[in-house]
Amino acid sequence: MAKVRVLPKVLVHQIAAGEIVERPASVVKELVENALDAKSSRIAVSVEDGGKSRIQVSDDGVGMSSEDARLAFEHHATSKIASFDDLREIRTLGFRGEALPSIASISRIHLKTIDQEALESGSSLGIELEYEGGTLRETREIAWPRGTEVTVADLFFNVPVRRKFLKTTSTELSHVSRLVTCYALAYPEVEFKLDHADKKIVDVPSVRSAQERVFQLLGEKLADSMVPLEFEREGVRIRGFTSLPHEQRNNSHSLYLYVNGRMVRDKVLTHAIRFAYRDLIPSSSFPVVLLFVELDPAMIDVNVHPTKVEIRFRKSQTIHSAILNSIEKALLVNRSSLSDLARNIPVAGPAPASGRSGAIGRGFEPYFRRRYGDTFSFRSSPQHRVFSTDSGDLSSQGSANAAGLDVLPQESREPLGASPGGAHTDDIPETAHLGATPVVLGQFVESFVVAVDREGIMVVDQHVAHERILYDQALLSFESGRAVPSQRLLLPATLELTPEQMAIADQIFDHLNANGFEVEPFGSQTVLVRGVPALAGNVDPKGIIENLLDELATLDELRGGSKLSDRSLRRVQEKIAISLACRAAIKINTPLSPEKMRWLLDTLMQSENPYTCPHGRPIILRLDIEEILRGFKRI
């Protein structure tokens, strides 16, 4: 008996559907793209249970005739292409003819539509089709005003294994919200609506420009922090908006990337953006970018994957160079705004006549890129005097003094352990007088605390050290079971959120208010902050909430309407503690008194983990005495 067999058509279609439909957002994507291809001016999306129970997408596009509607549910039936050569000139979002039949094979689907041309010629009847598991159940003529409405119910009802892989309601809703937001940003001339459980998530009327749509969806604050992109070279046009360096996010959800109007995920585009910001923001952070790449369709291959999200460029280096140049040009044109907005941006110029140099005052990174380019110093305690230098030449005492720095006299600059004749002794320095408790020497570039103990020298990053201390304190307070002290704001703060952020915020209001916050919804896309935990009383409350929502964007433990397990509650509390600690911690370029430095080290050493911050970055760098002696070839 033959072991190789032809699979049933229904099973083949269900397998194929798995490549296209991964989750409810995949259904929304395909239906929204069909609506856009149909020249719709209004698209309304409504979902229930994050889209797992029901998805409805309606539009006012050109619609379909009865014959076209039936053919649309046949595999590889499409009006977008007719020959292989047409693949080189794809200008529509859909073209494979797989979306509707794939969705129909794993759900219960109703389609109502009417052909716009027939409607204008006097025909007043449309068609309704009902499919279940890929099988046509019913067809009837109906009165229908205009456009198309597709209702998808019980996604994966006949593929229970796939249904088990769906995430929580809040997670699936956040994916749907992001999808609708992405296409609303790309098509400002189209009105978009998204409803969930009778609540408006997205509701934006049509506008004339992408800038107005950014204002609608991302908020006034972010819109004011973004600069326009406009660049064209070798047949590639780049347009859109990119954020100034002080606007940073924790994940790549802040990158909205489009090629010829198609939303894409592409390593070439992402790398070019990250490379443009390589010296302006930390490597773990992302800017906010709305990027439109427009080029000849023959220069790209969109037929890479059934989801049509991945593409290939025929000249990827040209695309990379164009994006890099467009962002660098936009930031350069707006450089006058940068020095006031971000500390870590290199700013050229002479050092001011004070104990804090201009370069260090706006970030110590330029110093580390140049060996001796700018003034640097230790802020010393009364018991210790440390070398300071200007341009790296210890004999440049005049210029160092002009910068207000402490410099040892020229005659006192003998090497440690050197005899008058210049020969080194073999004596090993004594460390017995030093205890196990570190002795603070001073502060390096107003960002690192330098200390010694009998084991060697320690350099402590003051920001991440304080972040670890505050994180431990916040988490201990949350886990104690007692009410977390809260500090009410003199004036409540309002914060505009994106639809994706609002979907997350809806799930955590109770958890925030149980952990020292006083936060409540204030409109469809705004939250009102009345109070924050006392631990962060002096910190911008908006920054805390924004940072927290970014932290929670990838957290699947949130379950809307259900009680959190102990483990899930711990994860949410950890994210809240991280956000509080990150915002409230001492910043770099902050002078500290000897007492403050002493307190910082003493408190840090009481932590269970004094060596890494909650994000995993190191807190302490150590140079042991043996390494020092080996470096000077004494051992």
Image: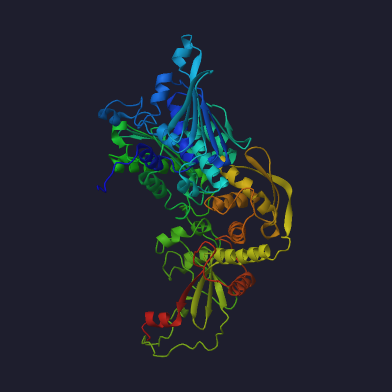
Residue 446 visible within the image: no
- Measured from the top left, where is residue 43 in percent x and y? 52, 28
Q: Looking at the image, is 369 positioned above or below residue 429?
A: above
Residue 294 vs 529, above or below: the answer is above
The structure's colour scheme is rainbow
Q: Which residue is drawn at 50% across and 15% down?
A: 125
The x and y percentages for residue 304 are 32, 40
Left or right: 206 with respect to 396?
Answer: right
In the figure, residue 293 lies in which quadrant?
A: top left
Name the spot of residue 329 as percent of width and height, x first.
41, 41
Task: Give whichever of 195, 56 is nearer the camera.
Answer: 56
Res. 421 visible in picture: yes
Q: Residue furthest top?
A: 122
Residue at 32 percent across and 37 percent down: it is: 303
| Up-down relation of residue 634 to residue 543 (above or below) | below
Left or right placement of residue 48 versus residue 162 in this view? right
x, y percent for residue 121: 46, 9
Q: In which quarter of the image is the C terminus?
A: bottom left
Direction from residue 77 to residue 60 in the image, left or right: right
Residue at the outermost front position: 1
* Residue sitting nearer the eye, 463 or 387: 463
How many numbered callouts?
Answer: 0
